[in-house]
Structure formats: C-alpha cells, structure tokens
Amino acid sequence: MKDVFFIERDPYAPVRHCYTVSKVLYESKSEYQEIMVLETPEFGKLLVLDGVVQLDEKYEFMYHEFLAQVPMHAHPNPETVLIIGGGDGGTLREVLKHDCVKRAVLVDIDKEVIEVSKRFFPTLSSSFEDPRAIVINEDGYKYVQDCESEFDVIIVDSTDPVGFAHVLTTEEFFRFVHRALKEDGIFTAQTESIHYHLDMVVKIQKSLRKVFPIVDLFTSVVPIYAGYWWTYSIASKKHPVRQPAREVKVQTKIYSEEMHRYAFLPEGFYGRLIEGEFRL
Ligand code: SAM
C-alpha cells in the first residue's frame, strides 16, 4: 500500500510539517474552524484545526506540562484557575492534578473541539468530568472582561494568533486579564516560535510589561510545532516566577523543579532578545 501524507496548511510559519497518515478518523467544519483527527504510525492521533496540527498523542505532554505546570508552581496556592482555549483538555488535566485547585474554568469558543477531544483523545479530555471543572463556550476575550479579582492563575492555550485568537495577544486583553486576576495572580500564554515569530514574542512581552510588574519568558521543545523551540510568556503581579514556589508533588513526565528553572532563558540572553540586540 502507498503511504498517504498530510501536509500542514500553516499560513503563520515558514515551514510545513508533513505527516505519514494511516487513517482519517474525523473531518468536519464547525461554526469556527475545520476540525480533523488523523491517525499516524509515529505520533498517534493528531488534532488538526484549520489545517494546523494542534497536538499529537506522543509529545503533547512536552507542551501541556510546561504551559500549565510553570505558572501553577510559581503560585504558592492556586485555588481558582481560568483556561482560555485549550478545548482538547490537556491544560485542564495538568491544572487539576493540583489538589489545591477548587475551581478551574475552561473557556473555549468552539464546543465541537471539546466534543471531538472527548471522543478521540481520552488521555487529554479525562478531566472534563472532574467536579471542579466548569466548561464555558464563549470568546475568552469577552469572558475575561466581566471578571474582577477572581483567579489565581490564568492560562491562554489558544490557536495561532490569527482570526478570533488574535485578540488574545493584545495589550487591551492583558489589561482585562490583570483585572481578572487576584492581587497575587499569575498569567501565562503560549506565544509561538522563538525564531519564526520573534517579532510577535517581543511585542507581547513589551505589552505585558506595560501592564504587569514581573514579566518573563520560558521555553520548551515541542516536536510537532514549527521550529520546535516554543515560547510561553508569563506575567505576575507579585510572585517571582523563575523558581517553583512549592514542592513538585504532581505526577509529570518531563516537568520538575529543575526543568522549571531551566525553562527560563538566561537573563542576559533574554534581555538582548527582547531589546532587539540579538536575533535568532
Ligand atoms: N496547543 C495548541 C496550539 O498551540 O496549537 C492549542 C490547542 S487548543 C485546541 C486551541 C483552542 O483555542 C481551540 O480549541 C480554539 O477553539 C480556542 N480558541 C481560539 N481563540 C479563542 C478565543 N478567542 N476564545 C476562546 N477560545 C479560543
């Protein structure tokens, strides 16, 4: 039998990954985006939105653990958490590993992504049934505007910053996030590739600095994302973020106290990158 390939249709990156596919398991068009689930021999199942691979079963932990565990451990006692996007459930799973969490609200604009994840990605969507989880289908930009001093941690796990996800990278949005956080709250967002999207990373970092007193950048390798070296912007009202504020007791595959520290770029390098003195 001939191999069948899927080539990503990513308008936002200069490279497109090509995957060997064994089966197309699901294909539809929701109100917001095209949704596909592909079976692959190497990566397990892939979730594809508008032609861009969002996650694979094999390496998703290398993204979700960093995105969620770094802010969750930088906070000494996160009880209320807001996730914007993240309809696959991977970030929610990581957040709800923490017994201190009393309530985790997930706001994804597209309810079909959640339904598809429940059907095809049980290891990611396992926490939707947790009684502490509240799922809302709304634009996260709109949702956060009605919140005040409500959350200890806010995490943005969105698609690339185009279309309806673009507003989640604006200074205006960060001001709403700041208001929605408690007085010692922490915010994190996935902010794309360190080299292909550096201009955007710098813009986001500079916007965050106008709003929060502590702003930083951490990274992890994500084998399925363009360029592999992925960034996460983090902003805090009070707590330092480069060290975990408490012992790592949750079960993880790659995140640890040591990985938390090493995820942050050396300060000199980080400074030069954001000030434009060095380009990758
Ligand atoms: N980890 C993935 C990545 O970086 O490629 C993100 C995966 S998650 C499936 C992305 C989710 O963000 C999608 O389900 C999409 O519906 C949601 N999303 C995008 N913009 C949104 C917005 N403005 N409000 C709420 N959810 C949004």
Image (cartoon, helix red, strand yellow):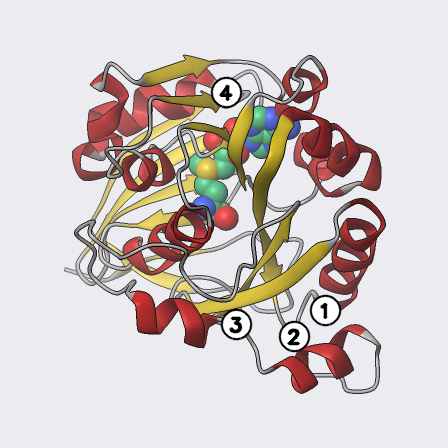
Quick one: SS at disc 2?
loop
Quickly name the residue at label 4.
110
Question: Mark 1: which amino acid?
Answer: Leu
Q: CA distance from mark 1 to mark 3?
A: 16 Å
State whether residue 52 appears in this view: no
Quickly name the residue at label 1.
198
Q: Mark 1 against mark 3, which lies toward the viewer?
A: 3
Res 20 quadrant in image:
bottom left
Residue 58 is situated, as x and y percent measured from the top left of the image, at 22, 57
Quickly name the residue at label 2.
195
Q: CA distance from mark 3 to mark 4?
A: 32 Å
Q: CA distance from mark 1 to mark 4?
A: 28 Å
Question: Mark 2: which amino acid?
Answer: His
Residue 103 is situated, as x and y percent measured from the top left of the image, at 37, 20
Residue drawn at the location 20% of the way across and 52% of the way down = 249
Dot 1 and dot 3 residues touching (CB under 8 Å): no
* Circle 3 crowding by C-alpha within 10 Å: few under 14, some 14–19, many from 20: many
Q: CA distance from mark 3 to mark 2?
A: 16 Å
Mark 1 / mark 4, whichever is N-terminal: 4
For the residue pair 90 and 241, the one nearer the viewer reads as 241
Dot 3 and dot 4 residues touching (CB under 8 Å): no
Side (left or right) of 203 relative to 30: right
For the residue pair 1 and 217, the one nearer the viewer reads as 217
For the residue pair 270 and 225, the one nearer the viewer reads as 270
Dot 1 and dot 2 residues touching (CB under 8 Å): yes
Dot 1 and dot 4 residues touching (CB under 8 Å): no
Quickly name the residue at label 3.
264
